[in-house]
Amino acid sequence: MRRKMLGVLFVLSMLLTIMLPIQAMAQDTIKLGFVDILSGNFKDIGDRYLEGVKFAVKEINASGGLLGKKVELIIVDSEGKPDVAARKATTLIQKEGVKFITGGASSAVGAALEQLAEKMNIIAIGYGWAAANMTNEKCSKNFFRTCLNTDQQSYALASIMAKKGYKKIGILVQDYSFGKEASEAFKRKLSKLSPSTQVVEVIHPTGTKDYAPYISQILSSNPDAVFTSNWGNDLRIFLKQARPMGMKQKVYGYFMNDEMMVQSFGNEDHLLIGDVGAEIYTLTIPTQKNKEFVAKFHKEMGFYPTWLRGKAYMSTMFWAEAVKKAGSAEVPAVIKAWEGLTYDGPAGKMTMRACDHQILSTAWTFEMVQKNPFYKHAYIGPSTAVPVKDMETPCGGEEKACKMKN
Amino acid sequence: MSDIPVFFLHGLAYAGLLFLVSAGLTLVFGMMNVLNFAHAAMYMLGAYFSYSIMLHATGQFWLSLMLCPVILFVIGGLIERFLLRRVHALGHVQELLLTFGLAYIITEAVKWFWGNYPIAINIPGVLNTTIQIFGITYPVYRLFILCCAVIVGLVMAIILFKTRLGIILRAAVNDSETVNTLGVNVPLVFLGVFAFGAALSGFAGVIAGPLLTIYPGMAQEILIDAFVVIVVGGFGSLGGAVIAALFIGELQSFGVLLFPKLSMALVYMLMAAILVIKPSGLFGEKQ
């Protein structure tokens, strides 16, 4: 009896698995798979990205959807692990018929999804994966990056710092591929813009708890300012320890507009005042579109579209533009339509370069201030534009050119 | 070479923190033969409790410095009495697994209660100033950490080696049955040791909070450092922990100055070298 029941169940479950994709395809929606970190230590990153994507999808659907169809967002947790992300994305593609997946935290996850997208012929959209090689030597026609890569972000900061006329700059980066790439790109750009500027580089292991020796090392060379690509705890603990050790220099960083980082300083947020950052999205971009976007987002969600939220929103809106232009949600049509397309969003115009699928966009630089219209704690002041040409990379990176396969 | 005193001071301050974090771990191992994987989680609990105390009694850093060890003492006592004691007879592997599981439970509980994001602790005015020393600006708080480490080390040494309680403790380690027949409540002694170890970890957590900020990953990150200290110093040796903490603190500090490319590997190279030359650690006894 029991065995018979099991047999029936088995057949039923087989039938269900076969039927599910058919059912899924029958629904008339365009599916966007969200694959990002929604648990563990970096949950706050994925959560904020998701809020941006959700808001964009809501806005697209409220204005009639895409090609007359609603956009359906399917959310899965990458756990920050490349294998988990690839497995879950594969399920989305095979069982749900998803043709577009989007994500941003952890370039290791990004690289896995880029490969997967090429293998399964879907489109992966990165709003945060910054490893330059994803659009250089590892580029793929199935991958589009809608944020700055490490080369561009270092170039932006290098050109801002070169314009300040600093004679000597301290560099503090983490001892792994990301930190080293960021530092290399920074030095490369700086030596072109201001060959006479000296740099003093200090590399520290990730997860360093005591920055005192490193800070002393920087201070002993007495630089005019400090550049860092540090993120997470490595940024927070460094900034927390630097000023009390007598470091008065401004810090120019990749991740200064992280409101969670500022909040973690409690009433010691004055330690951040004067530090500088640059990103493609900030709350204080002085365009009319951005003012409207910030107001609308805040009204509907109850919080501001800071940093990650803004980036994920613009990325999703840009994708929607590409689908609209393609007039079809088929992968080859969208790839073709997106190449060379320009999106005019809250941050101004951004263009998807056809040769490597990397956006070119104005970046916005800001200084940390105490009084701001958004929070009680310190946050960013007014943003000014860093022109696209300051961040332009020769198509396909400097040495390791992208050779797009068709 | 005017840098030398500065870097020595940096190493000293970090050694202080390392010793505070590993003191409880090595005590519990030395007295009870239990490798307490939950030690760092209890250190994190100490930091979070101090945050909550300072939130409700604004700015009462000193109060939290006294209260948190007491809270952790109670928690440690409960863990020993109701969990650890039950698996003690089953052997070390079970004890290790138990504390390993506890570490996970505490970490998840912390995320549940306090949230999965970093929070700040602000230190009181006296400690939040800087002084000029060896020609550099130096935060007073780092000197405070060093003082705390020295005091904790001295108190532990006096208790262990100069008091009747210390004699009972050391005797209980060597031959618990004989000590038991002499009328000493050995289980109670072990409960006290474990609870005291927990209190020490809580104390270290309060001290570390303002320097490192507080976040759910802080336990995991400090655990490795604490293990390196007790491996190098010798499992269970208090003096070994002092020497090892100093060694590692100075090595990390001068490593930055002298071998910047190796600073990540230096500490582990030291550990590997010690394990090859003297597998029981600098001051460890052969097991």
Image (tube, grey):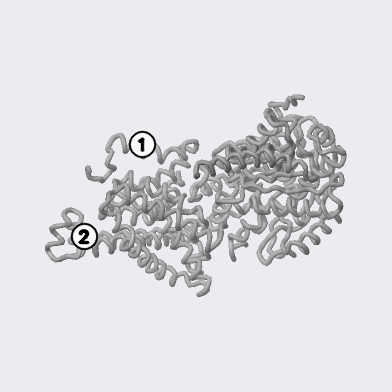
Please tell me in which quadrant of the rendered image residue B83 appears: bottom left
Task: Find the residue positioned furthest to the bottom.
Answer: B57
Please, which chain is the residue tagged with disc 2 on?
B
Question: Could you tell me residue A381's position as x and y percent?
Answer: 74, 58
Question: Could you tell me residue A91's position as x and y percent?
Answer: 64, 39
At label 2, the amino acid type is Leu
Q: Which badge, 2 or 1, comes first in the chain's sequence?
A: 2
- Is the C terminus of chain A in the top left, top right, bottom left or bottom right quadrant? top right
Question: Could you tell me residue A369's position as x and y percent?
Answer: 70, 60
Mark 2 crowdedness (10 Å alpha carbons): few <14, some 14-19, many ≥20: many
> In this view of the protein, can residue A365 be seen by the observer?
no
Mark 1 crowdedness (10 Å alpha carbons): few <14, some 14-19, many ≥20: some
From this view, report whether residue B175 is shown above or below residue B281.
Answer: below
**Residue under disc 2 on the same chain as residue under disc 1:** yes
Question: Could you tell me residue B231's position as x and y percent?
Answer: 33, 44
Q: Is residue A265 left or right of residue B35?
A: right
Please tell me in which quadrant of the rendered image residue A199 appears: top right
Residue in front for this viewpoint, B217 or A168: B217
Q: Which residue is mark 1?
A: B272
Image mark count: 2
Please, which chain is the residue tagged with disc 1 on?
B
Q: Is residue B68 left or right of residue A285?
A: left
> Which mark is drawn over residue B169?
2
Residue in front for this viewpoint, A270 or A263: A263
Q: Residue at x 69, y 40 (%)?
A: A19
